[in-house]
Image (cartoon, grey):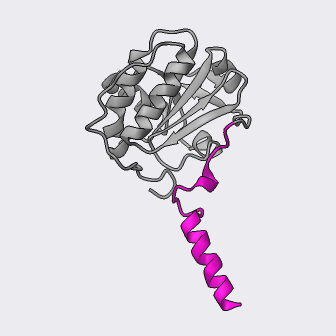
Amino acid sequence: MLGSLALGFAVSTILGSPSGCASAKQSLTPGDLAPEFLISSIEGKRLSLKDLRGEGVVFLYFIKDGDSVNNDAMPYIHRLIRAYYPNEHAKFFGVINVDQSRARAWNAEINPPYKLLLDPRGDLIYKYKIESSPAIVEIDTEGKIVKEWQGFSGYWLKDLNGFVSKATRKPLKQFDFSKTPSVTQFGRPYRGG
């Protein structure tokens, strides 16, 4: 009995628990409906997932302000996004964990190629089971999860590049990801980090 409890605890610890470790258990399932939401844009407008889907395929890029792994990934992500724009088939939205005042300063400093959505309390981060930044979720025009990417690596970016090419209906762009991590890196957890 005691051995079974210890084994159960070990498996729970390895597979993931509410402690903040990234695990498959925490992921969204491709093909499932994306969780609905109502969120404020940097301009103060309230937007729902349905509103965003009116722009085509939706990519939600989850940004933890000040996270070093996200800061390393951001130039590559921005370069990739800019390479496929403008287009009318897919749009990126940045979901940032700060209030409007800080988001405006961040926006002025970074000049991102997407609109910012504000999630200072982490409600959308929690709904979408995002463990850490960077993370990107693709949602199709019917509101279904296509794929999610959590962490940062060259493989991750190559995979994202293919999905963005398909969603935007533009030819696959070539990028040099040779200076990116070969093993996926994760930023500080949103909860407790």
Residue 116 visible in the shown view: no
| First to last magenta residue range | 1-30
Q: Position of residue 76 (x, y in %)?
A: 34, 30
Position of 144 compared to 170: left or right?
A: right
Residue visible at 46% across and 21% down? Answer: 114
Outermost residue toward the left in this view: 179
Q: Nearer the viewer, residue 93 or 41?
A: 93
Question: Which quadrant holds residue 31?
Answer: top right
Residue visible at 39% across and 23% down? Answer: 80
Question: Quick check: 191 above or below 102?
Answer: below
Position of 57 compared to 64: left or right?
A: right
Q: Position of residue 112 (x, y in %)?
A: 39, 23
Residue visible at 59% across and 27% down? Answer: 40
Position of 70 compared to 7: left or right?
A: left
Residue visible at 44% across and 19% down? Answer: 172
Picture quarter with the N terminus: bottom right
Q: Nearer the viewer, residue 176 or 2?
A: 176
Question: Quick check: 31 above or below 56?
Answer: below
Question: Which quadrant holds residue 29?
Answer: top right
